[in-house]
Structures are given as C-alpha cells and as structure tokens.
Image: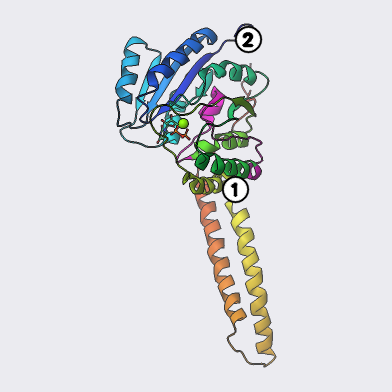
Amino acid sequence: MENTKKYSVTVIIPTYNEEGSLEELYRQLTAMLEGSASAHELIFVDDGSADSSLQIIKRLRESDRRVKVISFSRNYGKSPALDEGFKAAKGEIVVTIDADLQDNPDEIPAMIAKLDEGYDLISGWKRNRQDPITKTWPSKLFNFTTSVASGIKLHDFNCGLKVYRREVVKRVHIHGELHRFIPVLAGWEGFRIGEMKVSHFERQFGKSKYGAKRLLNGMFDLMTVMFITRRSTTPLHLFGRIAFLFFAGGGLINLYFLVQWIMGKGLHVRPVMVLGLIMLVIAIQIGSIGLLAELYSSTMKKTFSFREYEIDDQ
Ligand code: UDP
Ligand code: MG
C-alpha cells in the first residue's frame, strides 16, 4: 500500500489443532506485512492443541523472532486465547485472524486503511460465507438478534478477521465465549465500529471447532453482554422495576381480599389469592437480587475510557 500511513502491526492468531494451515498462513501474513507495515509481530496463541501446532509455531519462531508464542496448558477457548493475545500486543494496530486459512490476509491493508477514515475497529463481513448451512442459518439469526438488541449495525459480528486500534484491545476484555460480542463491548465503550466485506474460503485442513449448538449459548451470552453493558452500574434500576411490577400486582390482589374481609364477607382461599401471594414473594426475591447486585457493583473497581485527559500544569 503506497501513499497510506504505515503502522506497526500485531497479528493475533488463536490456534487450536490447526497444524495443516500454520506454515502457509505464516508465509501469507509475513509477505503481506513486510510490504505494508512499518514493523510487525505474529502472536500465535496455541489454545492447548493436541496435534503438532505448537511444535510448528516454535519452529517458525526459531527462524523468525517476530513470531511470538503463547501456549495454554489446556484448551480454554477462543475468547481467552484472544484476550491473552490482546494483553501481549505491542503494535499500534492489532489484527485478529483465524488460523484455518478461511480468511484472506491480503485484505488486511485495506482494512487498516479504512481505520483512517475515522474508525477504531473494522470488522470483516463474510459476505459469501463458505460453511455448511447448519452454521450459516443459525449465524444469520444470531447476527440479526445481536444487531437489534445492541444497536450496533453489523452484518457479521463473529468474523475472525478484525482490525483494531491498540486502545480498543487494551480496553475490552473478553472471557467465556464473548469474542462474538467484541464489537458490542467496544461500541459500548465509545469506540467507532466499521465493517468491510471480506472473502471467505472453505476450510481445507482440520475440523471446525464450533457447531450449531453454539446458537443457544450465543443467546445466553447476548443477555450477559446486554446486562454488563447497560446495567452494570445500576442493577437495581432493572431488578427494582420488575420487582415493583410484581409487588404492585400482588399488593392490589391482596388489598382486594383485605377489603372483603373488613367488610365481613369472610375469606376463602381462591386461585387468584394464591397468585397474589406468590407475586409478593417473587417481588421480594427479585428486589433482593437487585440489592445484592448493587452491593457487588459498589465493590467493583470501575474504570472509564477517555477521549482526552489533560490535567497536568505545564
Ligand atoms: N479456536 C481456538 N480455541 C478453540 C476453538 C477455536 O483457538 O477452543 C480457534 C481455531 O483454531 C480457529 C478459530 O478459533 O483459528 C476459529 O475456529 P473455527 O475455524 O473452528 O470456527 P468456525 O470458522 O468454524 O466458526
Ligand atoms: Mg474457521
């Protein structure tokens, strides 16, 4: 890429049993970066592979010190692998790419150039995804739901190919399987999110680690993300509202029976009376969960992300 600014670039490659593709991926990435970056490092995060992935990565490092090796003692998952890479990354620009050669490294320079149009994160969009229908359809549903729920307008949240400014990866932390929500978490922190169409190839080596069953987990994770982004500092605002609804409903029902009793009509246990009592109990339960969440939230260390912070006297 001529005429565009050259950055130092860190590429993070989460790797779980990908021995068939690593050497070719290394070749493609290195050729691309030597032409387009001012300096680079390739951080392979071996996520407890059982094949010869780690040996291959270590061999690459022997002849090229720009290859960095992080190897987990067991398989923790893609999110922990990426998070560990984020911590170690030194480049001004950080790129994540899957190890399976399903993405095209040659698209990275254009994505980096797009950052300069005023973005902090450019997420790939696998327009013609080369995966079985059992993955593409659940994925469409997932992307649609996540986009509507989060208000972040992306077509493909879970693309392995993404380009970030360093500040983003130092700020956003992912655990569990939250890597699918990086754009949501980053967007919530005020980072500007863009999208770019990328090509996608069929897997040639090894097996996919994810099946359709991740859809259900994805929905749970969406709840987690919505909760931690929206309510983390004021949980009682949410729980309190729900408790209040139950309390009001149960209270009205029982008030009705109280009035009946005062008017000497005699009390008989009726289904709606049981409902009223249950609603009061639920209100107390949900209210107390909200208070516990407040207690937890008040002890949580809070940090903020800033656009400017200049307070030193000159
Ligand atoms: N991966 C990982 N740990 C895991 C599962 C996957 O590091 O527990 C890596 C995997 O090696 C690949 C990337 O995450 O580089 C995406 O995985 P995969 O290609 O299996 O997902 P798919 O493309 O089928 O959604
Ligand atoms: Mg893949």
**Image-quadrant location for residue 270:** bottom right
Crowding near pointer 1: few (<14 within 10 Å), some, many (20+)? some
Q: Position of residue 273 (x, y in %)?
A: 60, 80
Q: Residue at x 58, y 27 (%)?
A: 124
Q: Which residues are magenta?
A: 148-177
Residue 301 makes an appearance in the image: no
Q: Residue at x 53, y 33 (%)?
A: 172
> Which residue is label 2 attached to?
4
In magenta segment, residue 170: yes
**Image-quadrant location for residue 249:** bottom right
Q: Position of residue 222 (x, y in %)?
A: 55, 45
Q: Position of residue 190 (x, y in %)?
A: 64, 33
Mark 1 or mark 2, earlier in chain: 2
Q: Residue at x 52, y 53 (%)?
A: 293
From the viewer's perspective, tell me whether residue 48 is left or right of residue 295: left
Q: CA distance from mark 1 to mark 2?
A: 41 Å
Ligand 1: quadrant of the figure = top left
Residue 282 makes an appearance in the image: yes
Q: Is 79 placed above or below 163 here?
A: below
Q: Which is more toward the observer, 177 or 190?
A: 177
